[in-house]
Image (spheres, coloured by chain):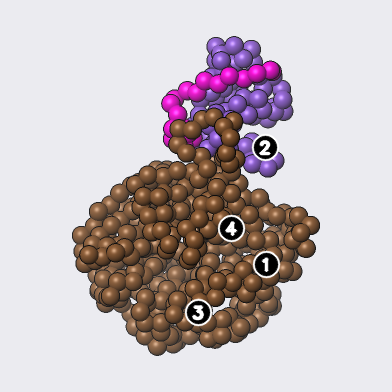
Amino acid sequence: MIRVVLPGHLRALARAGSEIQLDVTGPVTQRSVLDALEAQYPMLCGTIRDHVTQERRPFLRFFACEEDYSLEPPDTPLPEAVASGAEPLLIIGAIAGG
Amino acid sequence: MSKVRVLVGTRKGAFVLTSDGKRQNWDVSGPHFAGWEMYHLKGSPVHPDRIYASQTSGWFGQIIQRSDDGGKTWIQPGTPPGEKDAKQPGPPKGESNKFVYDTSAETGKPLTTHMWYDGTQHPWEFKRVWHIEPSLTDADTVYAGVEDAGLFRSTDGGKNWKELAGLRGHGTGPRWQPGAGGMCLHTIILDKSDPKRIYIAISAAGAFRTDDGGKAWRPINKGLYSQYIPEPTAEVGHCVHHVAMHPSRPGVLFMQKHWDVMRSDNAGESWQEVSGNLPTDFGFVIDVHAHEPETVYVVPIKSDGEHFPPDGKLRVYRSKSGGNEWEALTKGLPQRDCYVNVLRDAMTVDSLDKCGVYFGTTGGQVYASADAGDSWSPIVEHLPAVLSVEVQTLS
């Protein structure tokens, strides 16, 4: 079971709680986790990564185990602690704007 | 007993203001979608309890919301709340915010670039929906004007969107350039008397018209003079801020340009200036009285560098002669120390017997006049900066 923490606005959009649990088959990567997230919460399509290019939206970052994985290729395996469910993948909005 | 419902989009959420036909006492609901930029909300003339809303964010992109109960509850079209399993049979989910420019061969002239601020070509990049215009005849059909400028249409209640690519593809697209607020398609006017005619306006490209339902388009900017562009009378490149039309006279258009208030009596074939005695002819909003097609409203703003009313006095100007002769409407509006702006989609009129006029400010006030502008009072005074105001007249 993969754990994902969303920014507050996306939690409201998905009508989800503070932490989401996902079943991910195969390697646990940014792409596979986001695929599973969007399949379970289709209203989040396009809000984390672009609908067409599938690239991360520029003001969002991916953190896990106190490390920034935002610039890693989307198919790079996430840490074992995320794959095992010991640690969540944090999707974080940049602190910017008003 | 008639009622009015005012739909307010702000920088930090949407608000729904309701009153009876007297328009004196108001109920306020909101913020809906707190924290999100709500660029525009507009109700369907066919099914007034159906309201479409553009919810947007620099972080999370575009969302389309729809209410079918007058703004009490909302859904993302095609994605009912609580529905988690996208593998169920049925329409695709999560597509209601998918605005993809059409560059297919069928469009004839697929375009990939427009002019950037420095004069170089720049790829089209979808940013947000500025304006939503529900069809006059079908509650499931709705148009969206977007940044970077393009026109999209949904025929399934907002679930899926398809670009009317003939607008970008008609030939002048590479000469369109963003204004200070971005390259936005902000005005969509549907013509009740001719369902195939649509007017749109883009900052900074100008006004355009189709007469075949959106396939073929052409610029309608003859008579505009913009001294701030290299060729002041160019076919395109004008920073049009807003255009308004009275439904009973579809060939007559009023335009608030960056500078200049303009009028066309021939469906945009040519324009003449009607700024007349306005204290400044810079501004954003323009609208027409519901029952008097020659009565027009603007809110003059000091200049392009100083986006606030001249002399710190918030004044609506009304012309009862279709322009040129303007009177200041000040009763109930602050006449000192007022430095707000009124953005392009933030004025509207209701259709009650005595026409109501409404506008919102970047200072968070929404003012209403129940007597066609003779006097004003604030409905609310402390909202986030107001981006748009629309009103529905309900029976």
Is A51 above or below relative to B263?
above
Tag of residue A55: 2
Residue placed furthest toward the front: B89
| Residue carrying label 1 | B215
Residue B58 x %, y %: 54, 45
The answer to whether residue A81 is visible is: no
| Residue carrying label 4 | B153
Query: Going from the N terminus, do you reach mark 3 or mark 4 first?
Result: 4
| Residue carrying label 3 | B250
Q: Chain B drawn in what color? A: brown
Tag of residue B330: none
The answer for how far apart the CA atoms under marks 2 and 1 are is 32 Å
- Are labels 2 and 4 assigned to the same chain? no
The answer for how far apart the CA atoms under marks 3 and 4 are is 22 Å
Chain ID at mark 2: A
Q: Badges 3 and 1: C-beta atoms under 8 Å apart?
A: no
Residue B299 x %, y %: 40, 72
